[in-house]
Image: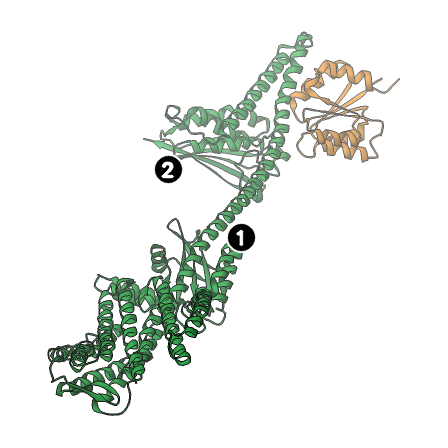
Chain colours: A orange, B green
Amino acid sequence: MDREKTVLFIEDDPDQQKMYSFVFKRAGVRFLQAQNGEDGIKIAEREKPDVILLDILMNGIDGVDTLERMKQNPNIPKTTAIIIFTNYTKEDVLKRAENLGAIEIIIKTDVVPSELVDRIRKKYLK
Amino acid sequence: MDSIIRLLSISGFAISIITCFVGFVALFKSKGDPRLKFIFFFMCLSIATWSFFYGLWLLADNHDEALFLVRSLGLGSILIPIFHLHWIFSFLGIEKKYKWLLWYGYISSVIFLLFAYSSLFVRDVELTYGFPFWPKPGPLYHIYLFINFIGLHIIGFYQLLVHLRRNQGIKHQQIKHVFIGLLLGVIFGSTNFPFWYDINIPPYGNPIVIIYISMYAYTMIRYRLFDIHLVVRRGTIRIILAAFIYGMFHLVTWAMVRAFGSVWVKPALITGIFIAIAFVLVLPLVEKGIIKLTNRYLYASIYNSQKTLRSLTRKLTRIVDVLKISSLITETVHEVLDIESVRIFAQNSTNHCYHLVHSVGFESKKNVSCDLEECFFTRWVRHFKKAVVKDELQFMAMEHRHRDKGAEKFIKIQKYMEKIGGEVCIPFVVKRELIGFLLLGAKISRDAYTKEDIELLETLGNQTAIALENALLYENMEQSVEDQTKEIKAKNVYLEKLLAMRGQFLDIASHQLRTPISVIKGYVSMLREGDYDSQTPAEKDEVYRSIAEKTEKLSHIVRDILYASELDTGEFTLKEQDIARFPIIPYVSKIVSMHQDEARVKNISLTFSAPGDALLVRASERYMEVVFDNLITNALHYTPRDGKIVVRVKPFQDVVRVEVEDTGVGIPKEDQPGLFEKFKRGANANSMYTDGSGLGLFITKELMDGHPNGKVGFTSELNKGTTFWVEMERAL
């Protein structure tokens, strides 16, 4: 049988961690969490998730730098769908993320949690 | 013999007329010391009286008439020596010193006058070497001749010579000309004396006395012996013209008599017609020539420079550059008037001094400063407005000698001009403001400045003042445009910076606003979708708590933004009704306890310490809450897990200080200045807390500044911690 679909959520706000964890877990997705970019990279190397949801403004290295490192990291498969999931809308930063290979950019306030889960499942977890 | 007598007679009348003219001009048409003018006038009158009767006497045809006229002639000649001496002494300013001599002169002269018509003075008239009625001296005449005429004149000449050496400039020139003229007058006038004593030296020198009087006229015009008006020039031309016509008439008559025997014979009459026509044709040319000659010798400078001045004036109106105007004027004046040195100064409005703009011929002079301070000299020049001639200041001092401090002032100014090496100063006065001046050195010829020079320079000064004023205005305008451009550029840079900071703020602010909204929106949608219907009450509570917390955060952010924009106008001051007396310790304690939950999450020890006494402050409760909330929240944000935060209340004499000390990341040295500016954050701030807007400290600072005796400050060390403190007015 297929390996359980896995989502890695990198975010430093505990409230959001809690909220998104609830919806993803209920949808039957394996939901991994990291508080910052560095932890995120380690988990990604080890667990090789299908989807990574990456915030931008975080303590320590920010989301875009994390993305860059992940893309250069040989232990993280190129097929991993890395999605920028943020409320930070500065255009040049988002542009940079796109160029670095973010597969999609989702603004948090634009979606409610159930929509997010549906979208991710349909697009990246088939 | 007859013609010689007639010629001498004419010379007598001519001397008389010219002397009267000179005397009257000096008296009525000149400025200056009235005393000097009167003495000069009486001197001229005595000469005129003598020469008038001299002319008449020579024409006398009988003994009695001749004796009467020669005694009348004495009325003048008796007074000539004493008036000469008096004039010389007053001219040299030594009247008082030789008072006794003058007394002697006047008393003796009066005695002579009393006996003028007696044989004690003039014994008789006799035929002498061809002159039918030459006078012979009485006993008093010997005294008059040897003591008064010869003695007093020798004293006078001696004094003139002594003072000639002592004086320089215009005074030197005046003394020189007076001396030469007087010497000529006396020597040639004296040719009348030998016949009295039957010595055969004929009186042919008498006509040359005209030169003596003319010398006065020349000195008056050229060397400002008396400060006379230009009317003299026209008068001079007329007199010379009249003399020419008179001479021509006699020349033609003499020539005709020689050629034809009489003027009434036919060939003489016919020749006369041609001569008349030729005369009419020639006369205007002669007049022109006379004007040219007088201009050349009496008004040399005006003659040479009028044309130059006209073209200079035309040029001046077209230039708007101070430097160009200045160099044009200095070079032109230097060249036209043959002056050793010319300098032009312009006012420097910023530091009240006169800046040397251009200078010619001053290279060799040392000890001449480039700029002149605003001082008594410049103030006086501004007030005086006219040309200041160094040599004339002495006369002005003499005129003002009776007034209190009047003379001293002129001497002081004269000394100052000496110091700065200026013979003449031409002020440029516009609207009572001295915008600059021209400073001229001595003439290369060592001649004094003439009246015409000064008038010319004054005209030039007026033109220059206007040109300079225009140029300065233009320059100021250019300067102000430049200043404004600079200001606009600086403003632009500032605005650009502000705009960049604002952009940064907006990015952060939108993130700050979106984050709680996304959580609230998410939870609310989940609640509505029934996701939590089957969850435990504790789990539901957790969701509600999150929503409440995020809502609270949202309202804080909105509050901060509103405060920041309100405070941004820079006119924030607390109103009296905002300020209240309240106990500070329980107030801070409550705010601290409100943050305990947050501290617990990061395992930070947040403690409060205060003295036991009740402390009252005068502050705004509403705003101080914002301040303390900001400081404590900041400390929580930038202190790592397991850290320590202490909030302390410290009373002072007039103020109460509240400190918030943390063991946080600290603020880098380079970020400390300007930390209270809007949007400013430490470089290491994002590593601890990403949602800082850079508004909190700006708001804190502005609010504290609005408080009575309100202050805010901090000390910080990188990676060790930061202490922020605020002070409020202590209430009793």
Q: In this orientation, which residue lies closer to the viewer: B551 or B194?
A: B194
- Residue at position x 54%, y 23% in the image: B556
Q: Hey, which residue is sitting farthest right in the picture?
A: A1
Residue A47 screen position, x and y as percent: 80, 27
The residues bearing labels 2 and 1 have C-alpha atoms spaced at a distance of 69 Å
Residue B119 screen position, x and y as percent: 11, 84
Residue A51 screen position, x and y as percent: 79, 23
Reading the image, the residue beneath label 1 is B319
Q: Please state which amino acid type lies under the numbered disc 2.
A: Phe
Residue B6 visible at all: yes
- Left or right of B316? Residue B650 is left
Residue B166 screen position, x and y as percent: 32, 78
Q: Please state which amino acid type lies under the numbered disc 1.
A: Ile
Is disc 2 surrounded by few (<14), some (14 to 19) or many (20+) residues within 10 Å?
few
Dot 2 and dot 1 within a common chain: yes
Residue B519 lies in quadrant: top right
Q: In this orientation, which residue lies closer to the viewer: A71 or B62?
A: B62
Reading the image, the residue beneath label 2 is B652
Tell me, for residue B415, which label it has, or none. none
Q: In this orientation, which residue lies closer to the viewer: B650 or B529?
A: B529
Q: Chain of mark 2?
A: B
- Left or right of A80? Residue B374 is left
- Left or right of B617? Residue B396 is left
Q: Chain of mark 1?
A: B
**Disc 2 secondary structure class:** loop
**Disc 1 secondary structure class:** loop
- Quarter that holds the N terminus of chain B: bottom left
